[in-house]
Amino acid sequence: MAADPIHQFEIKKIATLGEIGGVEIAFTNSAAFMIAAVIFTAGGLVLATAGRSLVPGRVQSVAEITYEFVADMVRSATGDEGMRKFFPLVFSLFSFILVLNMFGMIPGLFTVTSHIVITAVLALLVFFTVIGVGLYKHGFRFFRLFVPSGIPIVIMPLIVAIEVMSFLSRPISHSVRLFANMLAGHITLKVFASFIVMLGGLGAVGWAGAILPLGLTTALIALEFLVAFLQAYVFAILTCIYLNDALHPGH
């Protein structure tokens, strides 16, 4: 029988922390891996910067490359003002999501970003940050974001309605894109890997037939590593684009 491809996404309770209003508060494998991601990222950066040298070692090189990569991303999307204000947020989101995605690529570990509740919280964090910064910086002029310039007055109500709907749908697309890609990729990997096991149980003929799914699984693993990076990048670059709207709401 093929292994259940959904079982790998099951959230398991590790310990019960208490109750609030009759609702159990538990420490789960999802929470454990998120804490591990924070410790891994922070520890890696501390280790990289502890022994700074003119000729960087491997860990320092990775940290510097990551820093410059995110800095260029933020600067190109939001300008120098956005770089000063939002680099810590974007860098934290990018590193956190990337490490979680890479954890999910290790057999036996848990893919936190395959759960919509996690990606939705991250997307809502960006969404409300954009609104908060926009209103703080521009006041009600922030709502010019929904009124593009140069639009004939006749169709202005329709355009404003479309802009508002587009803005409100941002957290949905922002979160679903990451969640769906990680979920679908891992399910596909599990299905093809189960084909190898099933065919292998048929003897020599089965092993010969397993060559094709083995090759596809190997290719999919390489593709999933690329997707794990790209999804962290896409989440971060969209965050930069949305934050730019908070700084420059006018079209």
Image (cartoon, grey):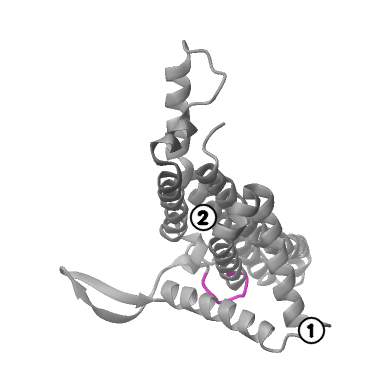
Q: For the point 46% across and 48% down, which residue is it?
A: 130
Above or below for 26 versus 50 = above
Tag in front: 2 or 1: 1
Could you tell whether 28 is left or right of 163 in the image?
left
Say whether disc 2 or disc 1 marks the residue closer to the N-terminus.
Answer: 1
Image quarter of the C terminus? top right
Which residue in the rendered view is the most extreme toward the bottom?
51
Looking at the image, which residue is at 74% across and 59% down? 216
Q: Residue at x 62, y 75 (%)?
A: 106
**Location of residue 132 in the rendering, given as x and y in whole percent from the top left corner:** 40, 50
Image check: 64 left or right of 35? right
Relative to 212, say whether 144 is above or below: above
Considering the numbered disc 1 on the image, is that residue within a helix, a strand or a loop? Answer: loop
Residue type indicated by callout 2: Phe
Q: Residue lying farthest right?
A: 55
**Magenta extent:** 104-110
Q: Is residue 4 visible?
A: no
- Between 171 and 184, which is closer to the camera in this rendering? 171
* In magenta stretch: residue 105: yes
Quadrant (top left, top right, bottom left, bottom right) of the N terminus: bottom right
What type is the residue that disc 1 sits on?
Answer: Gly
Percent coordinates x, y for residue 11 in the rendering: 40, 70
In front of the other: 168 or 101: 168
| Residue with the mark numbered 1 | 57
Q: Which residue is mark 2?
A: 179
Could you say which disc has been placed on residue 134 in the image?
A: none
Q: Position of residue 209 (x, y in %)?
A: 75, 62
User: Who's the residue at 61% across and 59% down the image?
Assistant: 232
Tell me where residue 102 sits by quadrant.
bottom right
CA–CA distance between discs 2 and 1?
34 Å
